[in-house]
Amino acid sequence: MKIRTIITATCAALAFSIAVPVSAHDGEAETVAKNFEAAIPNIPGKSLIAVEVDYAPGTASPSHTHAKSSFIYAYVISGAIESKVNDGETRIYRAGESWSEPPGALHSVSRNASKTEPAKLLAVFVLDTGDNPLTTPVK
C-alpha cells in the first residue's frame, strides 16, 4: 500500500471524525480522538490506527510508551509541538512538520510549545492487530 493512499485514507477519516476526549486533566489538557482504524489487507496481522491529539495552550502529555509493535508517524496539523523521543534531541515541530517513532520508543516529552495557542497533532500507528493499549504512561 502506498504511503499516499494511507495518508489519503487518514485525512478522509479526519474529515468525518467526531472528537471524543480520552485524556484530560481538570479540563485543560490534551484530548485524543481515534479517527481511523482498519486492518491492512495486504499485510496480514497488521493494522493502521490514526488518532488526533489536541493540546490546549501550555499543556503536555505525561512521558509514555506506545504499543510494543507500533511504528508511529506524527504530523503537526496546527500550532507547535515540543517532542523528545528516546535519546534524540528535544525539538519543536511546527504545523506541516513531522517525525516518526520506532517500535518500543520512549516519548519523554510531548507538549504544546505555546502557552497561548492550541496545537493539534495527527499520530498514525502501524502495528500488530490487537496490540493494546496504544499509549501507556511511564511512572
Image: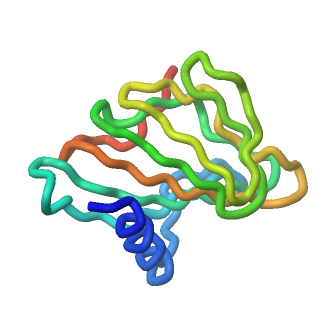
Question: How is the model colour-coded?
Answer: rainbow
Residue beneath the point at 38% across and 25% down? 104
Q: Residue 95: give x, y in percent of width and height.
A: 73, 59
Q: Is residue 118 left or right of residue 2?
A: right
Residue furthest right as drawn: 116
Between 12 and 1, the one lying in front of the other is: 1
Q: Residue 15: give x, y in percent of width and height.
A: 50, 81
Q: Is residue 17 left or right of residue 68?
A: right
Q: Is residue 128 left or right of residue 55?
A: left
Q: Residue 90: give x, y in percent of width and height.
A: 72, 27
Residue furthest left as drawn: 44
Residue beneath the point at 81% across and 54% down? 57
Residue beneath the point at 73% across and 39% down? 82
The total of numbered circles placed on residues is 0
Q: Is residue 71 above or below residue 42?
A: above
Residue furthest top as drawn: 87
Q: Is residue 60 above or below residue 121?
A: above
Residue beneath the point at 55% across and 30% down? 107
Between 112 and 87, the one lying in front of the other is: 87
Check the picture and name the quadrant holding the N terminus: bottom left
Q: Residue 66: give x, y in percent of width and height.
A: 40, 35
